Amino acid sequence: MTVVVTGAAGFIGSHVSKALLARGERVLGLDDLNPYYDPALKQARLAALQAIEGFSFAQLDIADRDAVGAAFAANPDIDRVIHLAAQAGVRHSLTDPYVYVQSNVMGQVVMMEACRKLPRCAHLVYASSSSVYGGNRDMPFSIDDRVDQPVSLYAATKRAGELSAACYAHLFDLPMTGLRFFTVYGPWGRPDMSAYIFTKAIFEGRPIEIFNHGDMKRDFTYIDDIVAGVIAALDHPPQGAEGARPHQLYNLGNHRSEDLMRFIGLIEQACGREAEKVFREMQPGDVKETYADIEAARRDLDFEPRVSIDEGIPRFVDWYRDYHGA
């Protein structure tokens, strides 16, 4: 049997693919290698995967129904899908909204259609985001909270993905699990994320911009913990009681809301130098704090994050030094 991983050359997708291969799974990776950030980083992640037996790859846009259909038809033993490909980034959604609808809404529908046409599809796991909680003030964020007031188009498209998944689970009895990720960081991370942005600026001797004057908190979650949660979700498809749709949502976070300034301080410490700081107002579409309630994931998936930012940040900076020769 083969597991499809979309976004396989991405940050989370490459780590998940590697973990699946390590336990003997065959993996078909899908990715369009788009230039949202430096494709060289995606190519480097992909090269590492292609060196592992059991991995195959198709370059395609997940919103291209013909290309996705052809890839699935060429691999009739597909029985599970981990759909991680998406257009990421809250701020970019303010300037290029069309790509978010194309990738995150149309892409989700294309993947669900492909899955329901498979001879056997035991489970579709897909990536959502903590951004769906919008401006919620109650902490920690619970999967039972209302999520009908997004503050960015990115968040709105991820919520649309959750709603369409619930619909498909109901209509076609297709087991699906949505995972709301909370600020993932770690080796091979995305250059548009805070850990990478701050580390790069510090090593290059440039100032870092800190929004809301530093009065921000995030549930920073290390990549290894996220991978463990994704794999556990894959292995536990929702059953759904009689008459209930087989669809479930989980938060995957570190269950700790850390001060942004402490996060920056740990990066400075790992880099061995202090950052020049420029404080700014809050940006449109951003939120002041995130904090994951992970009780459902603990109960159903035995999910337990293990890596604190005190451990994870030095690991990331070590990788950055090695990859960039910093």
Image (cartoon, grey):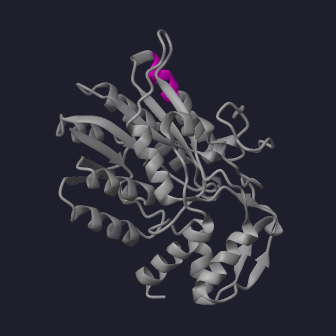
Name the foreground residue: 59 vs 241: 241
Name the foreground residue: 16 vs 102: 16
197 left or right of 106 in image: right
268 left or right of 113 in image: right
Above or below residue 241? Residue 98 is below
Where residue 214 sits: x, y (%)?
Answer: 79, 68
Name the foreground residue: 55 vs 212: 55
Look at 48% across and 14% down and name the residue there. 241
Q: Is residue 194 visible?
A: no
Where residue 1 sits: x, y (%)?
Answer: 20, 38
- Is 182 a magenta residue? no
247 left or right of 120 in image: right
Q: Is residue 92 visible?
A: yes
Quadrant of the rendered structure where residue 282 is? bottom right
Where residue 272 sits: x, y (%)?
Answer: 62, 89
Q: Residue furthest top?
A: 243
Name the foreground residue: 71 vs 101: 71
Look at 40% across and 45% down and name the residue there. 231
Where residue 163 sits: x, y (%)?
Answer: 56, 28
Magenta stretch, residue numbers: 164-170
Look at 41% across and 30% down and name the residue there. 237
Principal SS element in the magenta part? helix
Above or below residue 39? Residue 232 is above
Look at 75% across and 81% down and name the residue there. 277
Quadrant of the rendered structure where residue 313 is? bottom right
- Is 166 a magenta residue? yes
Above or below residue 167? Residue 82 is below
